[in-house]
Every structure is written in C-alpha cells, then in structure tokens.
Image (cartoon, helix red, strand yellow):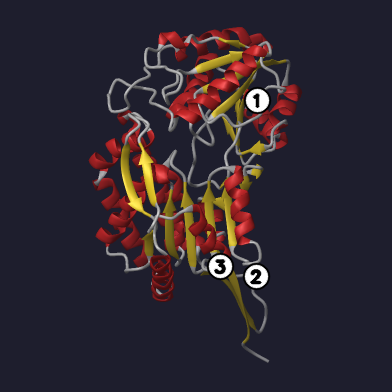
Amino acid sequence: MSAIIRCISPVDGRVYAERPAAAPAAIDAALAAARAAQAAWRRVSVPDRAAVVGRAVDAMLAMRDEIVPELAWQMGRPVRYGAGELRGFEERARHMIAIAEEALAPVRPAPKDKFERWITRDPLGVVLVIAPWNYPYLTAVNSVVPALMAGNAVILKHAAQTLLVGERFRMAFETAGLPEGLFQTLVLTHEATAGIVSGGHVDQVNFTGSVAGGRAMERAAAGTFAGLGLELGGKDPAYVRADADLPQAIENLVDGAFFNSGQSCCGIERIYVHRSLHDAFVEGAVALAKTYVLGDPLDEATTLGPMVKADAAAFCRRQVAEAVAAGGRALVEPSLFSRDADGTPYMAPQIVTGVTHAMSIMREESFGPIVGIMPVDGDEEAVRLMNDSDYGLTASIWTSDAEAAARIGAQVETGTVFMNRCDYLDPALAWTGVKDTGRGATLSRVGYETLTRPKSYHLRVAF
C-alpha cells in the first residue's frame, strides 16, 4: 500500500490535505512520458513555447481567490499577503519568458575566414524540480518556467506542507494546453525522490531546501552526471552604516526579519549597526516589532501568522533562551501577543541584543521571527562579522554612499549584495549563493545556462 503524504495545517493542527505517494509504476510512467514529450517539445520554437507558458501564467493568476486561502491553511501566511506571492510569481515568470529568445540564441564568435562557427544552447532533457513550502510558488517558478522555455520537460516534486501547489501548477499548464507529459507533478517519498535521482532518470535536479537535504541530493546524484542546482538557505546579514537613513533602515529590516514569520531563506537573521546608531536603531526596531498582530492567518487583521510547525517555533525559542542565558537581552515581551504560546506554531517576534557569534542565534539558521543585533565600530568589523558564517545567500548594506556599498559588497562572501533593500529577488539577476548556501543559479540569462548544454558547430565552408 502506498504511503500517505499529509499536510498538517499550522492554523489548527488538523490534516488539511493528503495524497497517496506515487507508486513505482506511476513514477516509471511519468518519466517515460516526460522523455517522449520532451523529444517533440525541443523542436518547438521559443516564441511558440512562450505562447503556451504565458497562457499557463494567466491560468495560475485566474486561480488567485482559491490560492490565497489555500496558502494560509497550508503554511500559515496571512491572507493579506497571499496575493503578493502571486505578483512575484508573475514578475519572475513573465521576465523569464521575455528574455528566453535572446538568452537561448546561438552564440557566434568573431568571423573566421572559410569557417562558420556557432554555439547553440540545447535543452538538457528532463528536469526534476524539488520545491519547498515557505514560498511555494516563487521557488518553483524559478526553475519550472525557464526549464520549459529552454525546451526541457519538468517533473515537480513539491513539499508535503504545500501539496496543493503542485496541483495548481498542473491545472495551469493543462488549461494552457501544454503537451501532455511535458509538465508533471508527483507526490513522492524521500526514498522515491532519491531513487529517481540515483537511478539516472533525470538530467538536472534543482533542489531548494535544507543543507542536509542538499547533501542527500549530492549523494543520490553521485556518478549519474546529472546537473545539480542547490539553494540551501542562509543566515543573511545586514549592516547599517553611520550614514544610513535610520527610519528607512528600521522599517525595511524589521520587515525583512519578520515577514512570512521569518521563514525566508533570504530573510534578515542578523543585523550589525554602527555604534553611533545602535541604540536608536534598536529602540525603533523594538517599537515596530510590537505593532505586529500575531493571529489566525485567515483574518485580514493578522500581520504575523503561525510558523509552519510547533517544532520550528520551539527551535527559535531555544535559540532566544540560550542567548539570554549567555548574557543576551530579549527586548520584546511575548505576553504582548495573546496568541503566543509554547508548544504551538504561534510565536511572537523577538529582537535580541547583547549577542555574540558564540551564540546559535547569530550562527545557525533560525528560519523564524527572531533577529540578533550587534553594534560595530566600522566597515572592517562589519565585513568580518558578515563573513563569519557557513552561509552566503544575500547581504544588505544600508548607507547613503553607493561607492561604499559596492566596495564593502565586494568583500562580503555572498551571492547577492543589496543596498538599502533586502529580502527580494530581481529576476533579471542571478539567484545564487556561496558556501553552505549551495551552488548553481536560477533566474536571469545565467539561469538559462544551467538548464541547457552548449553544443558547438565548426563548419569549414571553403578550402
């Protein structure tokens, strides 16, 4: 009998959705169908692919009224913010469609007498996309749309917590008239997923998840020569220089730390503030944190929903408690938030000062609504502390001096450098990371390079 994959809603702890895991025969059939469909799809012109994929984007947006409450039930994001994910989904999808023809065009070196030479960007074949629950549409679209636009077939394995998201993708592509078998979603156990990869059944795996999950993917892919893109999270820092616009930095960094209950790989998890601004920054951040409304994500008044699981909230509470026991100060009183309760996913936002890099809260990924703040005496110290991490996804610098931001950013070990903003993906730029954050890239024309293989043509046309 097949295993049952369940989504336990963080809203009330009940089973919100459940589906049987795909049986081996169904997996084999899906892989075969993908191969067959891709053989024909790779010959379809890029403009014709764009027409179909564009219709799928339209179809997804037409489901907005159903998707927004589904997101709240599945992973806890307040409904007042649910449409924002679909706006981001559309921005990324439309951009990747728009740049596809140019990004996939043949590369022609300088002319050479008596020869014709060019490089094509050929599709890889079948791409397995393994997507997480925290931004389930945004993370999946990063790979799904460009993979299809590049001429590949796609199999999407979505997280158990967001089972229904994969089905929404399938419905959108069916409505758009995408050829059968070209896009499929499979409900899979971890063992079945690893088996698909280790069996050499796919040509590329794009995985977003934990470091442990990324290592499991690398082990599974060993010896298959499949491509592997890994986005494994972060402990993203912010540095507020002495010349920063303080109110703007406070407003945006508090949002960057607490939006989506802090459950963002590029959320702000540690803040370094120039000593001259430190106390004023902390005072403003604490005042703003106290205005959040923690509650039922289906209530329009709620600005902070539950974390995805009680265990996740418990981990964050332990990080705060350990920091306080080691001399830190937790500045937001949880009793101000009536819904906050130990043993539940409902956790109030928390700001901790007096922290050091000996503490878990400044070193281990929290993935929750907590943030540590440290004073620094200048750029050199800030760079040293920002780089003192196993992760490197994004780093933000808050300053009125763009040259300083670029100079500091060049020294920070990270995939993206922000100035005066954070927690955002620009689809025109490569989304990538260093160290334990992973390898590979999605979005931009660079993302297309990871979903295609170069093929060189060297033709002697005269003697």
Q: Residue furthest bottom?
A: 463
User: How many neighbours does mark 2 have within 10 angstroms: few (below 14), some (14-19), or many (20 or more)?
Assistant: few
Q: Is residue 229 above or below residue 368?
A: below
* Amino acid carrying mark 3 in the image: Gly
* Amino acid carrying mark 1 in the image: Ser
Are the residues tagged 1 and 3 within 8 Å (C-beta)? no
Residue 110: which numbered mark, if any? Answer: 2
Q: Which residue position holds label 3?
A: 199
Q: Residue furthest front?
A: 1
Tell which circle, 2 or 3, labels the residue nearer the N-terminal end.
Answer: 2
* Coordinates of residue 193 in the picture (x, y in percent): 50, 57
Residue 257: which numbered mark, if any? Answer: none
In this view, the residue in front, 227 or 453, is: 227
Query: Label 2 vs label 3: CA separation?
Result: 42 Å
Q: Viewer-nearest of labels 2 and 3?
A: 3
Label 2: element kind: loop
Quadrant placement of the N terminus: bottom left
Label 1: element kind: helix
Q: Quadrant of residue 218?
A: bottom right
Q: Is residue 40 above or below residue 152?
A: below
* Coordinates of residue 164 in the picture (x, y in percent): 33, 47
* Coordinates of residue 51 in the picture (x, y in percent): 32, 62
Q: Which residue position holds label 1?
A: 360
Tell which circle, 1 or 3, labels the residue nearer the N-terminal end.
Answer: 3
State the residue at coordinates (49%, 69%): 125
State the residue at coordinates (50%, 30%): 312
The answer to whether residue 107 of the structure is visible from this angle is no
* Amino acid carrying mark 2 in the image: Ala
The answer to whether residue 34 of the structure is visible from this angle is yes
Q: Quadrant of residue 385?
A: top right
